[in-house]
Amino acid sequence: MAVAAVTLDRVSFAYPDGQEALREISLEVAAGETLGLLGPNGAGKSTLLLQVNGLLRGTGTVRVGGLPLNDRTLDQVRAQVGFLFQNPDDQLFMPTVWEDVAFGPRNAGLPASGVRERVERALEVVQMREAAGRPPHHLSLGQKKRVALATVLATDCAVLVLDEPTSGLDPRGRRELAEYLTSLEQTKLVATHDLEFAVELCDRVAVLEAGRIAAVGDPRVVLADAELMERTGLEVPHSLRYHAAGVPHQHLAAEPHGRHPSTSRAGNRLPGE
């Protein structure tokens, strides 16, 4: 049986003021899978992400690639997990883009040739090679996000953890980021308020509610559940409001008043009817 890329077994966490942010969270993320973490503000998404590389540590067990996270293995686990923060300015601090992307490989002790190879490959993936010599603070927000992603990719991590990656991006930047992420082979955990992004990118989603898991499953099924969305402070994404259940991307908006085709003209039948 294949080892899960990330496993959380009854993970709980409370902040010093007593606020319970996570309550017995259990999840498995398969190698190569993209899992979206969804929920309103305060649901526990970011806190959960920070458990994966030990920036926050509660009770329960966290495993990355089968390796349990503890004091002895912390450095090994962090070497496997790349964390993309919501604000790229929290991640970019060197004089040039090239130096920022090189920071991780250098700290890992790679020789100059290995550092150069990692940097060039990472910048190529995010299409920012032409910006290698520029100061990061001269870049647009979308460009900074791409460079921040490159700093993570250059570490050659197995798991990508992304906190609100589309925050502040314009539609083009959002689309480009989705394309970059879809092309990557790494396992991905993505906390986001952008439900359309989750539908496009994620293999599964987990909806959090007050630190607990309210639902897990296919985004086109989970996010189309109007009752669940209402209860957890979310909304059914527009792309799913007028789609037939179980028929991805069959747009029904052309029907009067969003009427389902099964209730429409006899000639408008769903596949298999």
Image: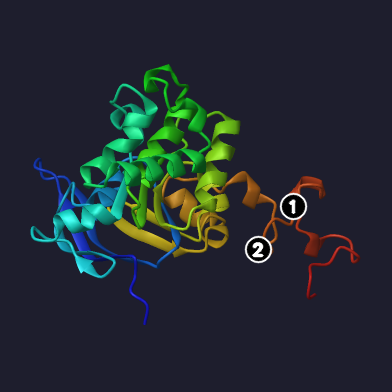
Residue 52 higher or lower than 40, as above or below = below
Q: How many marks?
A: 2
Q: Identify the amino acid type marked 2.
A: Ala
In the image, farthest residue toward the top: 138
Give the mark nearest the N terminus, 2 or 1: 2
Q: Residue furthest right?
A: 267
Q: Say the numbered circle drawn on residue 191.
A: none
Structural crowding at the residue carrying mark 1, measured as other residues with C-alpha within 10 Å and reported as few (<14), some (14–19) or many (≥20): some
Whether residue 202 is visible to the viewer of this picture, yes or no, is yes
Q: CA distance from mark 2 to mark 1?
A: 11 Å
Q: Could you tell me which quadrant the N terminus lies in?
A: bottom left
- Camera-side residue: 36 or 72? 72
Residue placed most toward the observer, 35 or 217: 35
Secondary structure category for the residue under label 2 = loop
Locate residue 269, reporting x and y percent: 83, 67
Q: Is residue 198 visible?
A: no
* Picture quadrant where residue 138 is located: top left
The image position of residue 202, as x and y in percent, is 50, 55
Q: Position of residue 175 (x, y in %)?
A: 59, 39
Image quadrant in which the C terminus is located: bottom right
Residue sitting at x 35%, y 36% = 101
Taking depth in this image into account, of 210 and 45 the one nearest to the observer is: 45
Q: Say which quarter of the image contains residue 170.
A: top right
* Dot 1: element: loop
Q: Residue at x 75, y 58 (%)?
A: 260
Vertical order, 182 against 261 (above or below):
above
Q: Which mark is residue 245?
A: 2
Q: Amino acid at mark 1?
A: His
Q: Circles 2 and 1: CB distance less than 8 Å? A: no
Is 160 drawn above or below residue 26 in the view shown?
above
Q: Residue at x 60, y 32 (%)?
A: 172
Give the residue pinned by disc 1: 251
